[in-house]
Image (cartoon, rainbow, N blue to C red):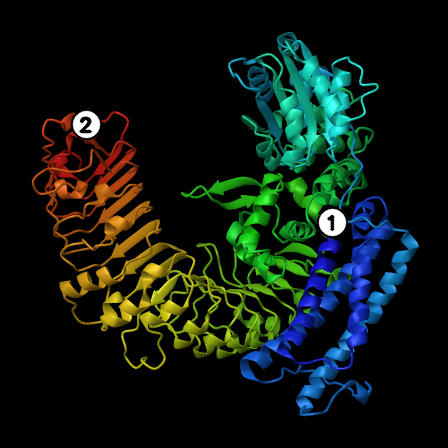
Amino acid sequence: MADAIVSAVLGQLRSIIGQQIQQEVKLVVGVDKEVEKLKSNLEDIEDVLVDAEERQVKEKTVRLWLDRLKHAAYDIEDVLDKWNYAMLKRQIEGVEYVPKKKVCFFFPSSCFSFKQVSLRQVVLRHYIAMKIKEVTENLDDIAKQKNTYNFNVIRSVEKSERVQSTSIVDVSEICGLVVDKSILVRKLCDSSEQHLPIISIVGMGGIGKTTLTQFAYNDNEVINSFDCRMWVCVSEPFDEYRIAKAVIEALKDSASGLRELNSLLGHINRSIVKKKFLLVLDDVWNEDYKKWEPLYHCLKNGLNGSKILITTRKESVARMMGSSDIINVEELPEEECWLLFRRLAFFGMSQEECKKFEDIGKQILSKCKGLPLAVKTIGSLLRFKKHREQWENILNSELWKLEKFEEDIFRPLLLSYNDLPSMIKRCFVYCVVFPKDHIIEKDYLIKLWMAQGYLKKEENNVMEIVGEEYFDYLASRSFFQEFKIDDDNNIIRCKMHDLVHDFAQFLCKNECMSIEVDGLKDPIINSSYHEQVCHLMVTIHREDSFPDSIFSLRRIRSFLYNSQGSSYPLAPNILPKLFGELTCLKALTIGRMSYWIVNVIEDVPKEIGKLIHLRYVNLRELKVRKLPEELCGLYNLQTLDISQCGRLEELPQGIGKLINLRHLENDKVWSLRYMPIGIQRLTNLRTLRLFIVSGGGGTDNKACSLEGLKYLNIFGELHIAKLGNVSNMDEARRLELKNKKNLLHLSLNFRKDEGERTNEDDEALLEILQPPSNLEKLHIVSYRGNTILPNWMMSLTKLRKLQLYGCINLKQLPPLGKLPSLESLDIWYMGSLKRVSNEFLGIESDGTSSSFIFFPKLKYLTFRHMSEWEEWDYEITRKGEEEDITIMSSLVSLQILICPKLKVLPNHLIQSTTLKKDIRLCSLLGYD
């Protein structure tokens, strides 16, 4: 991971130097040589880090050197952060930032230009100059020590130590995989496909991809189904010449005399004519289609039924190669793991001895989490240990500290790790901050990565998109598992396999860690931890049991309270000291994220203003009524999460100073009385969940108007609340909501603080608030108009979900049947609606329509609390073409709740045999 840290620090250093030149300011005068030396040493070290990362598994001294380098890089990062903050403060307030430390003036005065420079500026420049000199000297020693290891300069992982696989396997030694094998054999022996199909076996290192492939490759049915079978271990690099020669050799041909790749491929093409073949390409890594394409084309001459079978850790490789089937290999079931473990660990034991060790053996086995390679490694480790105490030592050990695991388990995982780009390595290792079996929220993780500076803008992609790509990169390479998908088929959360977690812990040691506090003992008792811990998650199991040792973790950059596993919240009295001591923090989570914890924090201490490096602050669901104005001095802040802070009435007036704020997560903070006027200055803001329209009441000079939203480029979701407070329609018109093309989900709530509002006002306002045409979800709440017929409604051709709640004066539904992409429709609390008829489909009053199909993609339809609804029928006359009309052909779920006066359902719903109906408290329909 050191290569990623050094790369990041170099990028930050270059950026700051560039900013100085651009702004024509020299905050650090006279240390140009020190800065250049620092940069040069970092670049020299960066050149050898690929080799050092590979050698650290075997060489402890290299591992210690990398640890020292990481700590030095963090010190450099701290200095650069202070330098950057000083420039930000100068930019925003026109004031110099001076660290609150005593500074001794023994640096040569010639280092500074005193022309128009205040004493405060001199103190600042002196402080930063001294710190740069200090970290440069330390790095100079590390750079000299580097020379003693004779590292090779490697720009990328050109060659790694990989064990070549073969097709030979002892079937009697295989446990499990029977079901997977039968599926794979069936696919291999299927001759129905006309083209040359590719089947891919995908999974993490050590999961059993090669074993499964060997198992099927040597099956009698497979052997008898093909004229020839070929096994090639590809590995990395993808050498087309070597692979072609291996294929020819497997065909029992000779490639002697053939020197050009084109000649080799031509030979293969001729050799497989009229042959039904199976080609296995084991351990494929390369994602370059240009390297794969020539080989694939030369293989198309085989008989129908020929197959290509590949194994890979990367789903992206399987997709690049055009796989018709992707089989994801899962962990072995517990009973199959036990069979494998027993055979290895209990080898040579009598039945009596086996019984003695069975209970502890199962406890040890649970650590392997279904990973065959781990079961084999730990089973082999125990094979010659005949004393229970030896087994208990293994049970009580952290697996990532076992030497045998370093050699056998972590080596294949290291191949996957070394294949990652440097910045993604850092993102992967950071995940160790979550405890094992923790549910990792993807959005939370990406924002934490962003806070640490791991996500840099690449080409036209902003940090958030880069984070999505990094997450997908890791997910597709089996570093994550157990994915939870949302309605839009996006991954929203996942877990990390325990053995992958152990491997990441091995890489970072105690740099990233999670601790559990139970009040019985201090979980950080080793003084060496204080030098190593940078990212910490805390789980609290006892009230008032926060360990004092945490206050001494001066390097710490992430402090995350784990509400998923905690039984008690953080005690409010520890926060001032926490904020006062842990001044390097970049990410802070003190809010709760689990409903069963009663959070007692009612005040955010003003000391939070000392955490000048903060990029991420999570105060979710705290009971605070106001936030300290000092929060607005956190100029680096990127994310402020105050979601569901149900008592919060105001945001700080100085919020406009947070020029780097990108995400203001304020979902369901209905208690807010208004949005501060400074919010319209936050031009980098991408997320604003809730915008409250002010109702006046003494806030006119403080509140941002609805028009102020015009200056913000909101992405994704926006809920505009209290639209009933809008008194000036021109204000709404100037908002030009339709131009916000990045807005995909919009909620319009027409409630008002006080007083009545006319139906016509709401109808006019709805017409003005035309959303962008690419809107996917629309939610209209508490609308008082008599009709919903804005001119823009039918232009929403991409609208997938529509919710109409509490439109109490609505007597007729809009022509929603014409919306081509609508998949989900919820209609609640329509107290004036009595009849649903042709207008709902989009049929004219004379019963005619230009369309044959209504609600073509609607899957889910819900009506709730429709107290006056009596009729639901259609009167369609298509001049003899009735049979061609289709209504809700895609509907899979119909829910009707508390509609006591509804008498009958339309025929197309009654006659459907596949429709899932949930009808309750509708007495006239016969559902009580």
User: Can the viewer see residue 531?
Assistant: no
Instruction: Answer above or below: position of 680 versus 54.
Output: below
Residue placed at 28% from the left, 26% from the top?
914
The answer for how far apart the CA atoms under marks 2 and 1 are is 65 Å
Q: Is 477 on the left-hand or right-hand side of 641?
A: right
Q: Residue furthest top?
A: 224
| Picture residue at 79% right of the left edge, 88% below the top | 105
Disc assigned to residue 884: 2
* Marks 2 and 1, the one that precedes in the sequence: 1
Left or right, 720 with respect to 844, comes to right
Query: Residue 872: horizontal and vertical position, in percent?
Result: 13, 39
Mark identifier at residue 507: 1
Vertical placement of residue 491 versus 695, above or below: above
Quadrant assignment for the C terminus = top left
Q: Residue lying farthest right? A: 148
Specify the quadrant of the image occupied by residue 115.
bottom right
Q: Is residue 381 left or right of residue 369?
A: right
Look at 68% across and 58% down and name the residue there.
523
Q: Nearer the viewer, residue 757 or 716?
A: 716
Residue in front for this viewpoint, 315 or 298: 298
- Residue at 61% x, 64% y is 546
